[in-house]
Image (cartoon, rainbow, N blue to C red):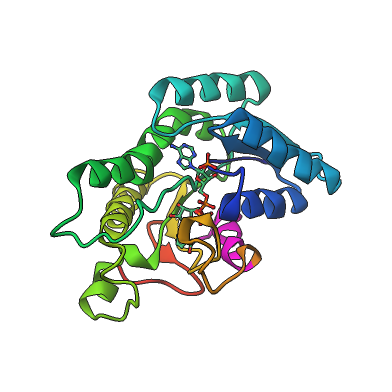
Amino acid sequence: MKTVLITGANKGIGFETAKQMAQLGYFVYLGSRDKIKGQDALNKLKSLGILNVELIEIDVTNISSIKKAKQELENQTEVLDILINNAGISGGQPQNISTSAIENLRKVFETNFFGAVQTTQQFINLMKKSNNPIIVNVSSELGSLTLHNSRQNPNFEIYDTYSCSKTALNGFTVMLANEYKNTNFKINSVSPGYTATDLNQNRGTQTVEQGAKFIVKYATLGIEGPTGGFFKETEIPW
Ligand SMILES: NC(=O)c1ccc[n+]([C@@H]2O[C@H](COP(=O)([O-])OP(=O)(O)OC[C@H]3O[C@@H](n4cnc5c(N)ncnc54)[C@H](OP(=O)(O)O)[C@@H]3O)[C@@H](O)[C@H]2O)c1
């Protein structure tokens, strides 16, 4: 059974992604920074008859927590096939970049950018044992500089801090995909789209089922799939 680790999977899009991946027959390591919330999420899946899932406590801003999670995973499996860097925070609002508190900007980057980088750095060796290793960085159209510049983005002023962190995350996707271009790794940024979750006080226009679908599509790519791209239904401009 192929294995997948999803960070921030105790609720929202991450939880739904865990559910859909498990239903497709993957063994899911459901990442949660809070053990109780993670256990509740796990119980919810088990009550639906989904048993191929295990809780992994992981806070992506805490290197000791990530290393502990890696050790726990290594005790349970020899290979990690898929890593979904989903954990993220919005940083509240408003976020106009000229006035955003630097502490808040740093906090958002700690989770959305550094969190994904340091989680990947810790787990990538375990992924090298997979014949089809896949990394999905859960990004957002708000990370697209092209869309911001063309003012096609409806939220272009109220989510500046968050947007910058997702642009940085996209940079990580490109650099890592380039570094691994001569391997079988598939490394992409994927946007779930504007989805009703706690992140936006449930104002998103899509359901979590719809949002998770895009992540699942790129987390289950075949060996011929794309790498180094930014996707939702179709490719998103950087
Ligand atoms: N919703 C949207 O419209 C939308 C659009 C584009 C992209 N996204 C992206 O989709 C991803 C999931 O967001 P969501 O909408 O599902 O939000 P959500 O419901 O607020 O879920 C966020 C998840 O991330 C976890 N998390 C936050 N900080 C963490 C940390 N330091 N370590 C580990 N886990 C942490 C949260 O855990 P706690 O429960 O402990 O807080 C929660 O499980 C994020 O990367 C977000 O940026 C969302």
Question: In front here: 148 or 123?
Answer: 148
Is 108 placed above or below 190 here? above
Is 80 placed above or below 49 here? above
- Name the image quarter holding the C terminus: bottom left
* Residue in the image at 50% along x and 61% along y: 201
Question: In front here: 218 or 142?
Answer: 142
Which image quarter: residue 26?
Answer: top right
- Residue extent of the magenta highlight: 210-226
- Asked whether residue 23 is in view, the answer is yes
Query: What is the x, y in percent for residue 14?
Result: 58, 50
Question: In front here: 153 or 17?
Answer: 153
Is 3 placed above or below 67 here? below
Answer left or right for 112 relative to 66: left
Answer left or right for 197 relative to 107: right
**Residue 40 painted magenta:** no
**Residue 216 painted magenta:** yes
* Residue in the image at 23% along x and 80% along y: 150
- Name the image quarter holding the N terminus: top right
Query: What is the x, y in percent for residue 178?
Result: 31, 49
